[in-house]
Image: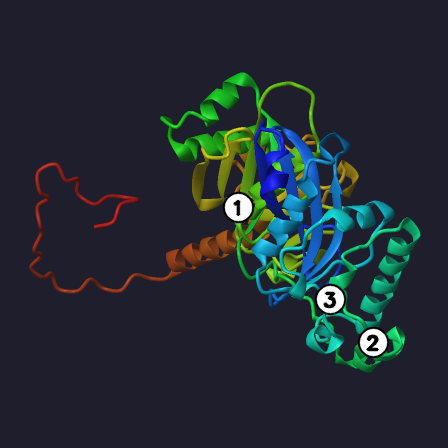
Amino acid sequence: MAASAERLPEEGLALWLTEWKGTRFPWRGRHLVASVGSSVAGQLDFFLHPDGQAVKVVMLRVHPDFQRRGLASVLMDALYAAHPTAWINHGFRTPEGARWWNRYREPAPQRNVHNRPPVEWADYFDAVNVARDKAHNAHQNGHYGLDGNRDAVYRYGERLETEAALYSSAYRPVTPVRVDPASQPLHGALRVALPPAVHAYVHDRTQDSRARAAALLEHVGHGNLPREVYWNTTRQAAFEDAHHQDLFDRQPPGPPLTHVVFTLASLHASVLPAARALATSVSFEHSGDLAVDVTGLAWRQADRPYLTHQGDFAPAVAAAIAPRSVEHASAAYRARYDEEGFLRAAARDGARPFADRAAQIQAMAERLLRGQAARARTPRLPSAPSQAVVQHSPSPGQRPPGPGRRA
């Protein structure tokens, strides 16, 4: 690994581990991304068993500009180091992958399932599938005249498919873990280029953090919380989503991006729409809006992740995850927000804070009026004999009780 690292460029190599959210596989998906400077240089995709003791490699790729410089080996070595006791299943290899594997020196070949008998790892992987991948890789090696580290590969004592079939029943499928969006706060990220004045204010640490958070939410729009995102169980995971999107969605030079993370109060189960839940995140699979309460914001410049700002709201601020289009917006959303997702004047000024309780309030008022009229028609009882009254004089500066004030 040392020799490989010496051939890497000096612009600054960084490894980022993020959740892989585009899969329905029951194990947890992970992206290990290598960036050099501001460019994506390589990526390793894998699944991690819930108990952390087995890894399934899915894809290893390096950008053409960074190939033949040892980066693929660095990524694979990092995977072995990150999971030092786990079984590693490399699956089948493409022709390019077979050539790379022929040059690679595996740091722990004894943890590679292709190198050990099925009895040791059959609880984690389907032995027949592993045997199929081994046969595919052996064919690739033979076709291209590669050694493929064959001395380490386990040789079956009988026909490959026969021995594999003996252990296929030992495989224990995983019941996927799904987060309950109603059980804890959720965090979702938005990338936004702010106007210069707004950018300067919200990133000014000398200003009140809550006021800056309120200004940022006002700029984004209370009805514009992002919908095409995964809502995570941690704020850090939401920031990782934004950074991962930066890496693979390079924008032309322009104003610096701000990563904004919204923290939502736990959602009531009765209002939850259809959702796709993963182990630590959830996405809402509906086209309409979703009313939420924002309890706080955190934000940072994309190029300065070490400076994070945070402002909390107490009480929480009413907001909404934006609908896919105005046509999909609910009546409650259209009454509160305009076509661009910003608060309407009535909602902004608080002129209609109880609009949804108008009938209840009207009925209560009518009962009070009827009670007053009934008391006015009731004859007064004779006055009781006067008694001594002790009156407490107010202290200096204290006003005596009057209408609208408590004694």
Q: Is label 1 in contact with label 2 (beta carbons under 8 Å)?
A: no
Counting residues from the N terminus, which is met first, the one under dot 3 or under dot 1?
3
Q: Position of residue 77 (x, y in %)?
A: 62, 50
In the picture shown, does residue 351 fall above or below 314?
above
Q: Position of residue 322 (x, y in %)?
A: 68, 40
For disc 3, the marked residue is 115
At x 77%, y 46%, the residue is 100
* Distance Cα–Cα, label 3 vs label 1: 37 Å
Disc 3, SS: helix
At x 60%, y 38%, the residue is 5
At x 33%, y 62%, the residue is 379
Of marks 1 and 2, the one in the foreground: 2
Disc 2, SS: helix
In the picture shown, does residue 52 fall above or below 332?
below
Frontmost residue, 44 versus 332 = 44
For disc 1, the marked residue is 236
Counting residues from the N terminus, which is met first, the one under dot 3 or under dot 2?
3
Residue density around tag 1, few if under 14, some if 14–19, many if 20 or more, within 10 Å: few
Frontmost residue, 241 versus 63 = 63
* Distance Cα–Cα, label 3 vs label 2: 14 Å
Q: Amino acid at mark 1?
A: Gln
